[in-house]
Amino acid sequence: MKISTNNDLVILGGTFDPIHYGHLRAVEEVRQALKTAEVMLIPAGHPPHRKSPWAAAQHRLAMTRIAVAHHPRFAVSDLEVRREGPSYTVDTLRALRQERPDALLAMVIGMDAFLRFDTWRDWQQILELTHLIVTGRPGWPAAELPEALRQTLYQRRCDDINQLREQPAGFIFFQTITALEISATSIRSLLANSQSPRFLLPDEVLDYIESKGLYQSP
Ligand code: ATP
């Protein structure tokens, strides 16, 4: 079945604490590789996989919105920030899939996150709801995969991004992206040490951080 392209969505979830050019460039490259797709950025409310974010959800949501304000192909969802309790990706994808039953959904995750993907809640179900686009990231070589994940990869891997158009969900594709060795951790650390992270993230996001006095202590 060839699927409709109108509602196609490249999805990137993250703590975005703060959002930076590593995130933005990764999804932009995937969007272009998929040709017509739009991007949805979904800041996590209460991520189950890591210690609490440094900045409050409302600030992370605001920074994410500011980062893409001038880019109409990029939308920001407050779905996870509004939801009570921990943010589970599977719940978010169920909600998106209900809104777009036939659309191609392609969730981007970095290789670092993919190596732990089998610990995500209902991870097999996630693959029924979306394609997975695993992006290469500096400093995270593809190490040994857990057995269950290796088997799933064997069944679902595809080597041609155009194959993703054949069904709305279910493939795993590895996309090489421009390696930008930027992390939110390093940006927070620069700020905590009174150094500027300028040019690692959009100026408008940095202005917001400074105006709200975020990330000033480690
Ligand atoms: P932190 O340093 O606080 O852990 P982070 O910079 O890794 O944060 P997240 O919000 O945790 O950012 O990342 C969200 C998603 O973006 C993850 O899938 C992650 O792999 C990916 N990502 C983060 N930084 C980059 C980068 N520089 N290049 C490509 N992908 C990235």
Image: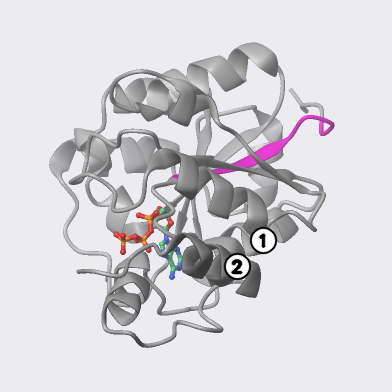
Which residue position holds label 1? 28
Q: Residue at x 38, y 34 (%)?
A: 45
Q: Position of residue 85 (x, y in %)?
A: 29, 20
Q: Which residues are magenta?
A: 5-13
Examine the rendered structure and indicate whether residue 181 appears above or below residue 76.
below
Q: What amino acid does circle 2 point to?
A: Arg
Residue appearing at x 39%, y 48% in the figure: 15
Q: Residue furthest bottom?
A: 195
Q: Is mark 2 within 8 Å of ligand 1?
A: yes
Q: Is residue 32 left or right of residue 200?
A: right
Query: Is the residue marked by circle 2 packed among few (<14), some (14-19), or many (20+) residues within 10 Å?
Result: some
Distance from disc 2 to disc 1, alpha carbons, whole Å, reads 5 Å
Q: Is residue 156 above or below residue 194?
A: above
Where is residue 13 shown, x and y percent of the image?
A: 47, 43
Ligand 1 is in which quadrant of the figure? Answer: bottom left
Q: Which mark is residue 25?
A: 2
Would you say residue 108 is visible in this rendering? no
Q: Is residue 9 magenta?
A: yes
Quadrant in which residue 125 is drawn: top left
Frontmost residue, 215 versus 97: 215
Q: Position of residue 170 (x, y in %)?
A: 50, 30
Which amino acid type is shown beneath numbered disc 1? Glu
Q: How many marks overall?
A: 2
Residue for point 54% across, 71% down: 206
